[in-house]
Each structure stands twice: as structure tokens, then as C-alpha cells.
């Protein structure tokens, strides 16, 4: 198996080569490359497929007991400073490689159907390939510097993909917002990296942890300073994994095409933050204050995301806030020391959330045939309903994903979420209460989405609702963007089947096949982490633990305790599902009347806790006000001082030129007056 590890560097390089070759083709031979649509797609997908096969082979090798493999080379040297680069393959790396490549591969297959008529089809594939390569490079990085390099590449790739339809102001604003929010977190990460290197002299994860602990214990470094460095590093995952208060970019990222929404919000960009916390665990675990900050940040973010998702009407925005909430669970798990549980939820969430996003894209694709290529109408659940009879595959897959995220056994999300809640209860019951309440809200808003979209009567032909939505959003009907229909087809009222339709339609096989493929792990993969046979934890456990310790802990499993905890989490989920069915399926409870009775709370949720408004006032408008004040200072003081100096020089020059007349008698008179003046002054 050794040659397999020696060529593991090909996993991130293959998609990078695909992105580079297609990108160079677009730059040098734009028309010819753009016309090779299917050929370019097959080329890029094949390269990623090869990387996926290599990833599965590495995971199988790691499961069978192969030792951690690290290949390094010296990248930079100056005096005693040595910076090495390379790649490492361990259990966590192998698992993440499989997650990223499988989701990215299925997303690329799905993209062929979703972006079929988009003129940027080939460019989108090049961006997807670059994004995948960046994330895979991050996963195999053996030290913090290399992580940071690929961390920034992931950020650049997401900027390109979120702003893919750059001619839309909303998309252009969204990619800028994502870029700026992530730069805030990344600046903290950079400061923390440099601080830890100053203290420990290393960028290696375990070396940093051991040396930092030793320095704090011996008093060579204060615990407060070590905590500060660690919190600064944590700011990177706060931004990348959309934790409060840097979560605001992620819902706006929905302006990008749906395939990239699935990739960003499932297995790649947002997972990078949780992955970095796992890699930095040797540093964090010895700093209790930092672990508490991580745990409470995750818990609060989980609650925040759920409370906002309850009232969202845009199907993609609802899933985005759901992602924020689930990421909060993962971060909370890391903070309470549930290393395996957090990564287990990362894995299960990657599959069922990718499927949910791709299902939403399938719904949008079907809705466009009815409402036209307008994102306001095609994504609003108030115009949906009854889609199950038109889109049976999409609706079934969406239901599976919904059951998984709600934590209903035996679906994948139940096992990972229940393990997190169990660990939270053992660590801090207040954290468990927050997680438990969030689980109930998750079940409510997800089944609200399912019932509103797939059950009841179809509302897509209701012109009154369409008009109300367009007026409410001040959005004219426009022919751009969602990618499933060409503008010429819209002009003639045709869909991609060649005729206008009064009802939605199921998506093509290139879109439904990835949904069905993702439905399998969404249903079954959780069985790898059951508490009575936890194979996942035997593979993925905290760096400071040994397999013997893990096996000993697993033998302490108590069925009664599990049934009580699982019963509580399933019970609150069933309450949420019941409420959603009474409001949005049977309509026995008028949700509109309830919203009116609690109008302030409803508006608080609908307006996303007014956090976007606060950011707009404090940072956007505040920075503009500050810029105007700086401009005033520059104009009145700096420019004024410069202009005054010039004016004085000009004035003195104009006056002195009359003293330069070339007459000796006049110069003698000046000398006489000067001497006389000096005599008078000295006499006084």
C-alpha cells in the first residue's frame, strides 16, 4: 500500500490541473473552450472521480491499520527558520478526503443538468474544480501555515462561485460580504498563528499543543496570553463555519447557483472551520476558557440559526440558517470535548444537507417552468405546495433529508446529534437545554419547509400571490440567473422541454441521480456510530487519546441512559413535527394568527434578529461616516496646511521680488536700515 500513499498528493492536484487547463482554455481560446461544454465537464468530473477513488483507497487502508503517513519537503529557509510543506494521511484526513470528493463529485454531476443552459457552464466547472482542489489541499495539510494557504484559496474560490452571476447586484454584494466577513476571521487566525509560533517556535499541530501546555505549566507564558492566541485562532473557524457574530455572510451566499450552495454548505467551506478546530484540538483542549468559549459560541449559534429559520420563506435561505444551526452543534461538541461526536455530525450532515440543497435546486428548476426565471418567485415556498405529485423523486429525497436532520431514528442525523446532546448533558446541562430546544425548532422548521413545498395544493399559478410577492420584494420579473432556463426560452414562454407549463416537472436524471445516491448515506451512514457499536469513534478519536482508552469508554455504554437521552431528543423532535403538521398540513392551527399575536417576536425572527441592520448601521454606514470625516480632515487640515504653505511662499516671493532691482544705492539703504534697527534693538 506504500505506493498509494506516495501518490496521495495527486488528490488535490488532479482537480487543480483540471481547473488550470480549462481556465487557460477559457482565457486563450474562449469561444472554442466554451463550445466544448460536455467535453470540459467530463474532463473535470473524471479527474475528480479519480481523486475520489484514491480517497476511498486511502480510507480503506487507514481502517485496516496503516500508520499515519507524512511526506515533507523544505519550502523556505532563513537562518534557523525552516518552513516545511507536504501532506499527511491519517484517519481524519482520509475521512475528510472521502467526504469532500464524494459530495463534490455528485454536485458536479448534478451541475450538468442544473446549469445546462447557462452561458457560464464551462467557467462554473472550472471554479468548482478549483474549489474542490483548495479544500482537498487544506485537508491534507500537515501544519498550520499550509492550512492557512489553502484556507485563503478556499475563500477566493467561494468568492468566485458566490458571485458567479456577477451581473446581478445581489450576487455581487453577497460575494463581497462573504469575502469581507471571512477576512475579519482570517485576520484573527493570522494573528493567533503568529502568536503561537512566537511562543512555541512551531507550526506543527501536536508540537504547538505540547509546548504551549508546558510553557503555561512552567509559568514561562501566562495562561491569559495563551488563551488570547487560541481565541484569535478560533476566529478563523468562527468566520469560515459561520458562527455568531460572523455568520451573516452565509445566508447571502445563496445568491450563487444551487450546486455551489450544496458544496459550500455541506462538505467544503463551512466544514473547514470545524476541521481546523479538530486539527488545533491539541492546543485548545488544555485551555478551559477557550473550550468554554467554543462550546457556548456553538450553542448560541445553533439556537440563533434555528430561531431565524422558523420564519424564512425562501427555501434556500431556510436551509442556509439550518446549516448555521447544525454547524453550531458541531462547534459545541468540540467545545465540550466530544471530538468524535462533532466530526461524526460533520460527516452525516455533509451528506443529508448536500442532498437537501440539491433537492431545493431541483424544486427551483421545476418551478421555473411555471413562474419564469425569477429567483424571488422560484424560491419562495408560498408559491409552492403539492409538488410531491409532480416531483416524486425530489420529494422523497427531501423527506429523507428532513427526517435525518430532525434526528428521527434510524436516519443518520439521529445518531450524531444524539451523541452530541449526550456529551453536552454530561459536560453542562445548560448547554444540553439549548441543544435540546434547538432540536425541537429544527424539526418544526424543516417539516414546515417540507409541508409548504410538497404537500397541499399547488399555488404556483396564483397570480394574486405572485403579485404580492413581487410588490413586497420590489422585484421586477427578470430573465437571468438561476441557470436552468435560457433567456431566449423565457422570451418565448418555453421551458427546457420545449413548451410552457402550468405545473412543475421532475428534474432530469443528471439531477435526480445524485439525489438518490446521497439518500443512501443520509439513511444508513449513521449506523457506523451507534453507541452500542461505535465503529466511527474507533477510527476517529481525539489526538490525546489511545484506541485502548476509546474501547474502554465504549464498554461503559449504558442502554438505559441512552434510551432516556434519545427519548428526550426524539420526543422534542416529534413535538416540533406535530406542530408543523397542524399548522402547514392540516391547517388546524392558524399560523398567521399566531404570528399576529406575537408580532414583535415574529418580526425579530423574520428580520434575522436585525443583525444585518445593525451591521449595516455600525460597519457599513459607520465606515462611510468615518471616511467622510477623514476626508474632511484631509481637505480642511492637511490640504489646508499644504495650500497655506504654498500661498505664503507665493506671497513672500511676490513681495521680495521688488527688493531685487539691481541698484547698489537701494541695497546700501537696506543694509543701513538693518544696522540701524539692530542698534536700536540692542540699545533697548
Image: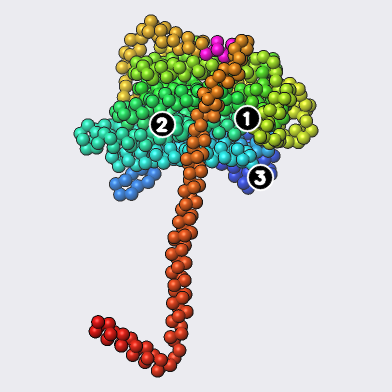
Main SS class of the magenta portion in the image: helix
Who comes first in sequence, dot 3 or dot 1?
3
**Magenta segment includes 319:** no
Q: Dot 2, crowdedness within 10 Å: few (<14), some or many (≥20)?
A: many
Which residue occupies 68% across, 31% down? 470
Q: How many marks?
A: 3
Is 446 situated above or below 661? above
Q: Quadrant of residue 416?
A: top left
Q: CA distance from mark 2 to mark 1?
A: 28 Å
Badge 2 vs badge 1, beta-carbon distance below 8 Å: no
The residues tagged by marks 2 and 3 sit, at their Cα atoms, a distance apart of: 38 Å
In the displayed structure, would residue 528 be above or below residue 224? above
Which stretch did the figure color magenta?
A: 576-582
Q: Earlier in the sequence, mark 2 or mark 1?
A: 1
Q: CA distance from mark 3 to mark 1?
A: 21 Å
Residue occupied by mark 1 = 111
Pointer 2 or 3: first along the chain:
3
> Which residue matches tag 3?
30
Amino acid at each position: 500500500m506504500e505506493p498509494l500513499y506516495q501518490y496521495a498528493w495527486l488528490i488535490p492536484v488532479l482537480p487543480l490541473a483540471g481547473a488550470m487547463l480549462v481556465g487557460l482554455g477559457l482565457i486563450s481560446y474562449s469561444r472554442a473552450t466554451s463550445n466544448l461544454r460536455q467535453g470540459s465537464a467530463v474532463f473535470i468530473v473524471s479527474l475528480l472521480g479519480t481523486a475520489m477513488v484514491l480517497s476511498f483507497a486511502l480510507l480503506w487502508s487507514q481502517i485496516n491499520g496503516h500508520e499515519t503517513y507524512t511526506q515533507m519537503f523544505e519550502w523556505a529557509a532563513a537562518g534557523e527558520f525552516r518552513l516545511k510543506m507536504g501532506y499527511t494521511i491519517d484517519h481524519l484526513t482520509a475521512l475528510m478526503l472521502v467526504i469532500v470528493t464524494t459530495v463534490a463529485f455528485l454536485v458536479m454531476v448534478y451541475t450538468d443538468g442544473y446549469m445546462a443552459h447557462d452561458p457560464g457552464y464551462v467557467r462554473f466547472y472550472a471554479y468548482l474544480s478549483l474549489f474542490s482542489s483548495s479544500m482537498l489541499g487544506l485537508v491534507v495539510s500537515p501544519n498550520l501555515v499550509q492550512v492557512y494557504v489553502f484556507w485563503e484559496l478556499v475563500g477566493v474560490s467561494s468568492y468566485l462561485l458566490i458571485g458567479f452571476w456577477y451581473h446581478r447586484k445581489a450576487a455581487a454584494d453577497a460575494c463581497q460580504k462573504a469575502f469581507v466577513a471571512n477576512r475579519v476571521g482570517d485576520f484573527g487566525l493570522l494573528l493567533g498563528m503568529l502568536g503561537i509560533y512566537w511562543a512555541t517556535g512551531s507550526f506543527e499541530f501536536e508540537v504547538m499543543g505540547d509546548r504551549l501546555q508546558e510553557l503555561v505549566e512552567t509559568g514561562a507564558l501566562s495562561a491569559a496570553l495563551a488563551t488570547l492566541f487560541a481565541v484569535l485562532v478560533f476566529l478563523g473557524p468562527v468566520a469560515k463555519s459561520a458562527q455568531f457574530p460572523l455568520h451573516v455572510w452565509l445566508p447571502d451566499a445563496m445568491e450563487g447557483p444551487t450546486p455551489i450552495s450544496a458544496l459550500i454548505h455541506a462538505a467544503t467551506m463551512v466544514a473547514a472551520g470545524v476541521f481546523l478546530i479538530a486539527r488545533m484540538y491539541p492546543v485548545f483542549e488544555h485551555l478551559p476558557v477557550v473550550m468554554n468559549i467554543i462550546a457556548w459560541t456553538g450553542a448560541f449559534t445553533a439556537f440563533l440559526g434555528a430561531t431565524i429559520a422558523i420564519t424564512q420563506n425562501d427555501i434556500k435561505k431556510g436551509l442556509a440558517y439550518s446549516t448555521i444551526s447544525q454547524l453550531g452543534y458541531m462547534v459545541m461538541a468540540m467545545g465540550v470535548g466530544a471530538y468524535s461526536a462533532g466530526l461524526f455530525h460533520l460527516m452525516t450532515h455533509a451528506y443529508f444537507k448536500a442532498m437537501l440543497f440539491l433537492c431545493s435546486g431541483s424544486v427551483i428548476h421545476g418551478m421555473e417552468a411555471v413562474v419564469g426565471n425569477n429567483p424571488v418567485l422560484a424560491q419562495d415556498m408560498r408559491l409552492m405546495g403539492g409538488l410531491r405529485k409532480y416531483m416524486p423523486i425530489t420529494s422523497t429525497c427531501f423527506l429523507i433529508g428532513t427526517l435525518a436532520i430532525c434526528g428521527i431514528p434510524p436516519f443518520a442525523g439521529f445518531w450524531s446529534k444524539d451523541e452530541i446532546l449526550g456529551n453536552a448533558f454530561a459536560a453542562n446541562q445548560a448547554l444540553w437545554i439549548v441543544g435540546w430546544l434547538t432540536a425541537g425548532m429544527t424539526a418544526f422548521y424543516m417539516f414546515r419547509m417540507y409541508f409548504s413545498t410538497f404537500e397541499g395544493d399547488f399555488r404556483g399559478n396564483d397570480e394574486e400571490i405572485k403579485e404580492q410577492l413581487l410588490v413586497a420584494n420590489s422585484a421586477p420579473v427578470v430573465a437571468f440567473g438561476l441557470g436552468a432556463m435560457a433567456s431566449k426560452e423565457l422570451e418565448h414562454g418555453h421551458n427546457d422541454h420545449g413548451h410552457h407549463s402550468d405545473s412543475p416537472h421532475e428534474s432530469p436524471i443528471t439531477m435526480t441521480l445524485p439525489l438518490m445516491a446521497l439518500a443512501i448515506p443520509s439513511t444508513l451512514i449513521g449506523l457506523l456510530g451507534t453507541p452500542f457499536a461505535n465503529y466511527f469513534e474507533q477510527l476517529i478519536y481525539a489526538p490525546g487519546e489511545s484506541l485502548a482508552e476509546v474501547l474502554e469508554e465504549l464498554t461503559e455504554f449504558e442502554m438505559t441512559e441512552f434510551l432516556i437521552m434519545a427519548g428526550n431528543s426524539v420526543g422534542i423532535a416529534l413535538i416540533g413535527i406535530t406542530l408543523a403538521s397542524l399548522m402547514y398540513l392540516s391547517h388546524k392551527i392558524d399560523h398567521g394568527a399566531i404570528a399576529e399575536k406575537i408580532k414583535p417576536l415574529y418580526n425579530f425572527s423574520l428580520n434575522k434578529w436585525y443583525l444585518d441592520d445593525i451591521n449595516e448601521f455600525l460597519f457599513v454606514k459607520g465606515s462611510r461616516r468615518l471616511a467622510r470625516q477623514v476626508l474632511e480632515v484631509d481637505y480642511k487640515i492637511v490640504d489646508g496646511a499644504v495650500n497655506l504653505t504654498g500661498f505664503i511662499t507665493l506671497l513672500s516671493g511676490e513681495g521680495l521680488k521688488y527688493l531685487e532691482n539691481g541698484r547698489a544705492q537701494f541695497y546700501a539703504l537696506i543694509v543701513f536700515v538693518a544696522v540701524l534697527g539692530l542698534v536700536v534693538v540692542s540699545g533697548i
